[in-house]
């Protein structure tokens, strides 16, 4: 009886080992992309998703993001730990936006948000990051998508988070660059073009609905922007292999502050854990 139990135990261990080996081999052969949507404060839920992927040893080869997804994705691509991302995200405040502005193209100059970006990200060229990275912006003059896959990581993120009307746009030669959510809030197609074989995406706007009448012009701008982004996504379709959509009930795009941030990270972690078996199955073939 003991011999039988021992044989069953050894057989089970060998089967598990072969499954893990197969997953690792597939991960080595295929390029895995992580796509992070925009969504203002809700984008901090992406940190929870990253936490779970790291726990399960899922190594990401390509990171693509828009708006807040671009900022969180950039921090990850730079090699920042999850703990450091959470620490910095908890310090993110609405007051970071409020800076005097005498330019009619935006309520705020963007200097405040740029200072915050500099706390998150090193002064590096995107091509020098340990993980291949890109973020999306929109050029108002050409009415086209602009994908940043080289150049200053800080400037690229400043462009992708520049909510029109809220922040003064970034000006680059003959381009007027604003938040990528205007044109592509869920850029899984960009990840595909960058050579991704498997695309894991997190869309924080999919289950997001406005809870109440906007209490300020700032909230009205953000909600309007995100409604536009969701509408465009429905027409655009998706090429993701799996889309994680956290339950963010009770939270809004303006839910900044330590308590809200920690809750958002937990919601992202929860949806990733609920779907981890589906994610791991992507590497079985």
Image (cartoon, rainbow, N blue to C red):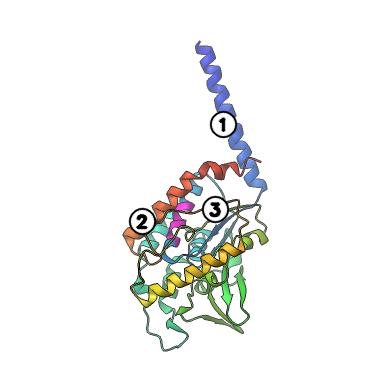
Residue at the location (46% across, 50% down)? 51
Residue 91's label in the rendered image is: none
- Element class at badge 2: helix
Q: Position of residue 151 (x, y in %)?
A: 59, 72
Magenta residues, start to end:
43-50
* Spatial separation of the CA atoms under disc 1 and disc 3: 27 Å
* Spatial separation of the CA atoms under disc 3 and disc 2: 22 Å
Residue 46 shown in magenta: yes
- Tell me, yes or no, if residue 22 can be seen here: yes
> Mark 1 = which residue?
16
Q: Quadrant of residue 137?
A: bottom right
- Tell me, yes or no, if residue 153 can be seen here: no
Crowding near the residue tagged with mark 2, few <14, some 14–19, many ≥20 C-alpha atoms within 10 Å: some
> Mark 2 = which residue?
262
Which residue is situated farthest in the top direction here? 1
> Mark 3 = which residue?
243
- Element class at badge 3: strand
């Amino acid at each position: 009886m003991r011999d039988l139990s021992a044989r069953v135990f050894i057989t089970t261990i060998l089967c598990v080992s072969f499954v893990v080996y197969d997953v690792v081999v597939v991960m080595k052969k295929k390029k895995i992309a992580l796509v992070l949507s925009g969504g203002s404060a809700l984008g901090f839920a992406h940190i929870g998703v990253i936490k779970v992927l790291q726990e399960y040893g899922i190594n990401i080869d390509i990171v693509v993001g828009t708006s807040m997804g671009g900022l969180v994705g950039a921090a990850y691509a730079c090699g920042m730990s999850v703990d450091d991302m959470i620490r910095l995200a908890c310090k993110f405040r609405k007051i970071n936006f409020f800076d005097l502005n005498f330019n009619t193209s935006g309520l705020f100059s963007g200097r405040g948000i740029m200072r915050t970006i500099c706390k998150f990200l090193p002064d590096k060229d995107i091509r020098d990051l340990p993980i291949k990275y890109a973020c999306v912006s929109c050029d108002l003059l050409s009415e086209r998508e602009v994908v940043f896959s080289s150049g200053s990581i800080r400037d690229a993120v400043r462009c992708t988070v520049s909510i029109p009307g809220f922040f003064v746009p970034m000006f680059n030669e003959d381009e007027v660059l604003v938040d990528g959510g205007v044109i592509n809030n869920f850029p899984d197609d960009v990840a595909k073009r960058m050579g991704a074989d498997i695309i894991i995406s997190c869309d924080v706007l999919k289950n997001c609905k406005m809870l109440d009448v906007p209490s300020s012009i700032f909230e009205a701008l953000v909600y309007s922007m995100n409604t536009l982004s969701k509408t465009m996504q429905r027409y655009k379709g998706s090429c993701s292999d799996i889309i994680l959509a956290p339950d963010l009930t009770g939270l809004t795009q303006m839910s900044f502050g330590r308590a809200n941030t920690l809750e958002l990270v937990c919601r992202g972690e929860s949806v990733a854990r609920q779907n981890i078996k589906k994610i791991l199955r992507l590497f079985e073939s």
